[in-house]
Image (tube, rainbow, N blue to C red):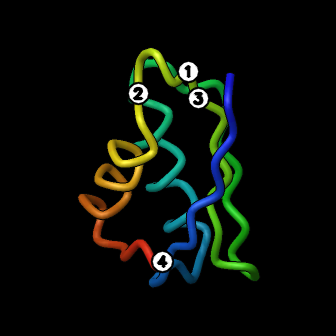
Amino acid sequence: MEKTVLNVDGMSCEHCVNAVTKAVTALPGIGSVAVDLDAKTVAVEYDPAVVTPDQIGTEIEDQGYDIVA
């Protein structure tokens, strides 16, 4: 497993946490998801042989949030 931390703009409440967590967890190869509203980050443990950080970011963006470089 590898870990990536994505900076995500637009998250402000527990609904956001649940939406992002549920969407990312549904992807294959995800070990864990930790959303930090204060830091505006999403830390994800994933299997790089199954899923990429780009795919994870796309899934978060599909929920209506923006990935910040």
Task: Choose the circle earlier in sequence order: 2 or 4.
Answer: 2
Residue 40 occupies quadrant: bottom right
- Residue 60 at what x, y percent from top left? 38, 57
Q: In this view, does 30 lie to the left or right of 4?
A: left
Residue 6 occupies quadrant: bottom right
Q: Residue tagged by mark 2?
A: 51
- Could you tell me how far apart the alpha carbons at marks 3 and 2 are, in whole angstroms? 7 Å
Q: Residue tagged by mark 4?
A: 69
Element type at marker 2? loop
* CB contact under 8 Å: marks 2 and 1: yes
Of 38 and 1, which appears nearest the observer?
A: 1
- Could you tell me how far apart the alpha carbons at marks 2 and 1 are, in whole angstroms? 6 Å
Q: In this view, does 39 lie to the left or right of 33?
A: right
> Amino acid type of disc 4?
Ala
Q: Mark 3: few, some, or many residues within 10 Å (few <14, many ≥20)?
A: many
- Could you tell me how far apart the alpha carbons at marks 2 and 4 are, in whole angstroms? 19 Å
Task: Choose the circle earlier in sequence order: 4 or 3.
Answer: 3
- Residue 53 at what x, y percent from top left? 45, 45
Q: Residue tagged by mark 3?
A: 46
Q: Residue tagged by mark 1?
A: 47
